[in-house]
Image (tube, rainbow, N blue to C red):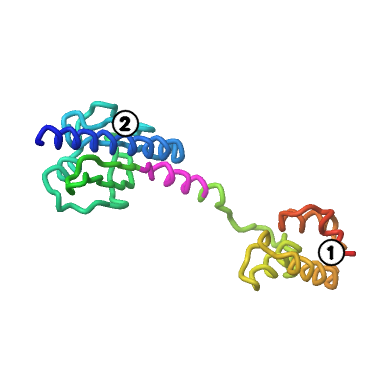
Amino acid sequence: MAKTKAAQAVTEHELLLREASKIVEALGKTLAPFCEVVLHDLTRPDHAIVRIENSLSNRQVGDAATELGLARISDPGMPDQIVNYINKLPDGRPLKSTSIGLRDSEGKFIAAICLNFDIGFFGDVVTYIQEFTRATPMTLDITEFADTGGRPTLEDQVRQFAAKRNVQPRALSAAQRHELIAELKQAGMLELRGALSRVATLLGVSRTTLYHYVD
């Protein structure tokens, strides 16, 4: 009986790691290259890492468990999910991390999936964007405007029409598209250059479809 129970435990353990490995692989591919995804086998703390995708930390399969992993091993009362906590890479770059503990049928932690997002990269991107969009006032005594004089554009009209109906432009029904075209025609907006093509792009339909509404 004891031997059978042990065999079942091994099978359950292997099954959980096998299925968790699929999740780690898929997450790694989806979130590459900004997120390191790691699968830990908490029954082998000295060689806990059994799969790692996008290794930002330069760790590899066979490396030891982290302090959080060791804490899960020693304390079954830890929460299953620890989400969006601050972490950092060995070189000091900031991470946003999430740890998901996986338990066996007896409630014991035997594995964990960890996600480590390199938020330092996104901080750099924000800095670049801020610098790129920085502008200074013109020193000449000239006032220049590059707008439409306060008049809504054709695209504005379409988006406002859809927003009043609590949908995106592409989600408008055929009847609503017919109503929209009637409004644009009445407002003279369809006389603008390329009007039907622009509206068709926003609605996700062909220009031929809109011709039927105009007729």
* Quadrant location, the N terminus: top left
In this picture, residue 137 sits left or right of residue 36:
right
Asked if residue 167 is positioned above or below residue 83 in the image, the reply reads below
Q: Nearer the viewer, residue 123 or 35?
A: 35
Q: Amino acid at mark 2?
A: Arg
Report the residue at 36% width, 37% height from top. Answer: 24
Q: Position of residue 74 (x, y in %)?
A: 11, 44
Give the position of the C terminus as an image quadrant: bottom right
x, y percent for residue 108: 17, 45
| Residue 124 locus on image (x, y percent) | 44, 43
Judged left or right of residue 188, residue 176 is: left
Can you identify the residue that label 1 sits on? 213
Q: Which residue bears the numbered disc 2? A: 51
Quadrant of residue 145 in the image?
bottom right
Judge by depth and name the residue closer to the eye, 103 or 74: 103
Is residue 10 part of the magenta span, yes or no?
Answer: no
Kind of residue sitting beneath label 1:
Tyr
Residue pictured at 66% horizontal, 62% vertical: 171
Chief secondary structure of the magenta span?
helix
**What range is drawn magenta here?**
117-129
Which residue is depicted at the point 31% across and 47% down? 98
Of labels 2 and 1, earlier in sequence is: 2
* Rendering coords of residue 73 (x, y %): 14, 42
The residue furthest front is: 1
Residue for point 31% across, 33% down: 57
Q: Are marks 2 and 1 in contact (CB under 8 Å)?
A: no
Magenta stretch: residue 128 in it? yes
The residue furthest right is: 215
Q: Residues within 10 Å of mark 1 (few under 14, many from 20)?
A: some
The answer for how far apart the CA atoms under marks 2 and 1 are is: 56 Å
Q: Is residue 11 above or below residue 100?
A: above
Q: Say few, some or many: other residues with alpha carbon within 10 Å of mark 2 (under 14 / 14 to 19 / 20 or more).
A: many
